[in-house]
Image (cartoon, grey):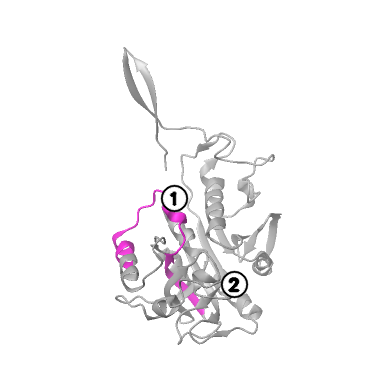
Amino acid sequence: MQRLFYGQLFQNGYLQLYKITSMQYPHSELVLNTDGQVYHLGLSPDQIAKNVILVGDQDRVNLVASFFDTIEHQSQHREFVCTTGTYKGKRISALSTGIGTDNIDITINELDALFNIDLVERKDKEQHTQLSLVRIGTCGILQPDVELHSYILSTHAFGLDNVAHYYEIEFNDDEIELNQAVNSQIPLPSPIKTYITEASEELTAKLRSNKTVEGITVTSSGFYGPQGRQLRLKNRTSELNDKLTAFQFKDHRITNFEMESSALFSMGKALGHQCTTICLGIANRPNMVFSKGYKEDMLKLIEYVLDRI
């Protein structure tokens, strides 16, 4: 991956354009802390593995790390907790992102920078490094036939957030067609501009089994109104969940709600990384039930993922 820039100079009385194939990132754009680490994650390149388990909850990092055979690095900066170690000979990092696609924007940019930008020279590296990023989370179930504590594996992420629209990201024909199909069946408030991105088929195939339920994951920009919940403030999405549940197009259906995958899939894919999400379903929205406790099932899901990536 090579970034191209264009400069201007006067030569023989004419304004000429010239190509710059390598350019330093300014200090205001590639922000590092006083130790030369990426600013928000607080990490150096040698402290993070190419295989990363992403979790929203900081405490879940320790759950993942409890399975590691060795631990070589542990750190925390703000909500970003990181532990790097080995599991059955594989070097893996567990990293918390916090809640929301805004945090994923930070996480993906800085993870990519750790591997694909020389932080000293502030230039792109000549050799691109591909990361494997698996999000393990919890989610709300949108299908009445899917039981609590099911392993829900995302084939696509349907973004109700706007993060991907800030970047030059090209969506393929299948993603565009599926996004159009969802919008034709599910009317949303007019300011919302949606997008759909496929998960990495290679990573998804590793996690697929008779224990998983597959479908489209809806990524919302909030927990209450954006997911059809209403407390004292009246929302504009009171019928949203019923329409999401009823959606059908070819062999696709919408299975669950969460808050991170759309930015993870779209940005990760655009940057040349493999990304997927597998969630433990802890609330069934059509059946209006919520888990009474899911720690043991989360531990089983974590081990399930570690054995397959």
Looking at the picture, does residue 123 appear above or below residue 224?
Answer: above
Which quadrant holds residue 26?
A: top right
Looking at the picture, does residue 289 appear above or below residue 177?
Answer: below
Residue 96 x/y as whole percent: 62, 61
Q: Amino acid at mark 2?
A: Ile
Q: Residue at x 57, y 57 (%)?
A: 103
Quote the CA–CA distance across marks 1 and 2: 32 Å
Report the side of 57 relative to 130 (left or right). Answer: right
Q: Residue at x 36, y 16 (%)?
A: 10
Residue 174 x/y as whole percent: 30, 64
Q: Which residues are magenta?
A: 151-178
Which of the marked residues, 1 or 2, is nearer the chain's N terminus? 1
Q: Amino acid at mark 1?
A: Tyr
Residue 307 can be seen in this image: no
**Which labelled disc corresponds to residue 22?**
none
Which quadrant holds residue 9?
A: top left
Q: Residue at x 34, y 63 (%)?
A: 175
Q: Nearer the viewer, residue 181 or 226?
A: 226
Circle 1 crowding by C-alpha within 10 Å: few under 14, some 14–19, many from 20: few
Q: Residue at x 53, y 41 (%)?
A: 117
Report the side of 180 relative to 219 (left or right). Answer: left
Question: Badge 1 is on which residue?
Answer: 166
Q: SS class of the residue under badge 1?
A: helix
Q: Nearer the viewer, residue 249 or 70?
A: 249
Residue 119 is a magenta residue: no
Residue 173 can be seen in this image: yes
Circle 2 crowding by C-alpha within 10 Å: few under 14, some 14–19, many from 20: many
Q: SS class of the residue under badge 2?
A: helix
Residue 52 x/y as whole percent: 56, 59
In this view, the mark in front (1 or 2): 1
Question: Badge 2 is on which residue?
Answer: 302
Residue 43 x/y as whole percent: 64, 49
